[in-house]
Image (cartoon, rainbow, N blue to C red):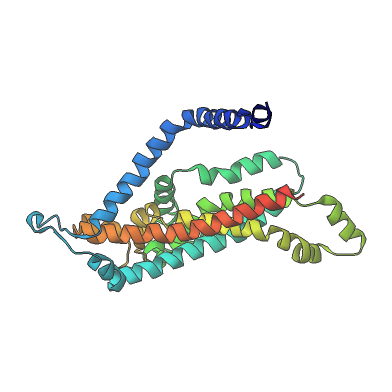
Amino acid sequence: MTDVATRPAPAPVVEKTRSSKERWVRRAPLLPALIFAIIVTQVPFLVTLYLSTQGWNALRPGQREFVGLDNYVTVLTDTRLRAALVNTVLLTAGAVIFSLILGLALAILLDRKFLGRSVVRTLLITPFLVMPIAAALLWKHAIYNPTYGLINGLFGGSTDWVSSYPKAAVIATLVWQWTPFMMLILLAGLQSQSHEVLEAAKVDGANAWQIFRRMTIPHLRQYLELGALLGSIYLVNTFDAVFTITQGGPGTATTNLPYEIYLTMFRKFEYGEASAAGVIVVVLTIIVATFALRVISGLFKVEANR
């Protein structure tokens, strides 16, 4: 009788098994999507890793061989690829910084109530919805064209803006397209600000500039970081604007890493080098994405503590 009375009940084990089965039942509908995502993203990346260790030129199909990390050494020491890396940093940083500044100005405008605000907001979001290749074609022909472009039509002259200012031409196109994205993020940050605190600051005698500098900007810091990081993740892979507007020129003035990878693959036919360069771009993107995820996590923690 004592053994039976003191014997532990098996109920917790049954409940644990049941909860485990319930978790798998809930996860089961997601498995096809997970498997599809792995096949579409990870398998090509593994193939790219394999190709990056091969000395493979399509013009010499019979001379393919294993070269280890030689392709990575070539990529990191090649002058064209180093120039492409510098151009990538300049184009990305320029587009992100100007997009954030304009996005902040527009977000402050839309944070105020005025007649037709919803219409203005919709119009300002529109550039972000335009396909990148279409946006690049629009700016190249309708705005930069030296003969019938909008800029020369308004200010006169026959300046070839793409040839004279290639980096600025690409950056302006990217800024036009990405400013709405920054505006939406910063507008969400402005609208999450406590109106009671702002009113209290006004009552205490703070003017608009003091409120903006000492309260609004610190409040928007994480939103600014989030916009900069997400924008950098996307813009570091910019190909459409460079390919369509400048073709990487004049010379290599606007050749960034994605475009240089394209040239290595389809002009030089060096599949191994192009794969190694692609892996390096992926690693850099993952590093930036890691910081972005930390910022997003911080934002969620702040919202949860309110």
Give the side of residue 295 with respect to residue 78, left or right: right
Q: Is residue 260 visible?
A: no
**Which one is nearer the viewer's eye here, 25 or 151?**
25
Residue 145 image-quadrant placement: bottom left
* Residue shown at 50% from the left, 56% from the top: 289
* Residue shown at 37% from the left, 60% from the top: 281
Q: Is residue 299 visible?
A: yes
- Of all residues, the one furthest to the front in this rendering is 1
How many marks overall?
0
Residue 290 drawn above or below residue 214: above
Give the side of residue 210 with respect to residue 228, left or right: right
Q: Horizontal and vertical percent for residue 270?
A: 20, 59
Residue 98 image-quadrant placement: bottom right
**Which one is nearer the viewer's eye here, 195 or 160?**
195
Residue 280 drawn above or below residue 34: below
Q: Work out which quarter of the rendered image holds the N terminus and state it.
A: top right
Q: Horizontal and vertical percent for residue 52?
A: 25, 58
* Residue shown at 62% from the left, 50% from the top: 185
Q: Horizontal and vertical percent for residue 69?
A: 25, 66
**Which one is nearer the viewer's eye here, 141 or 51?**
51
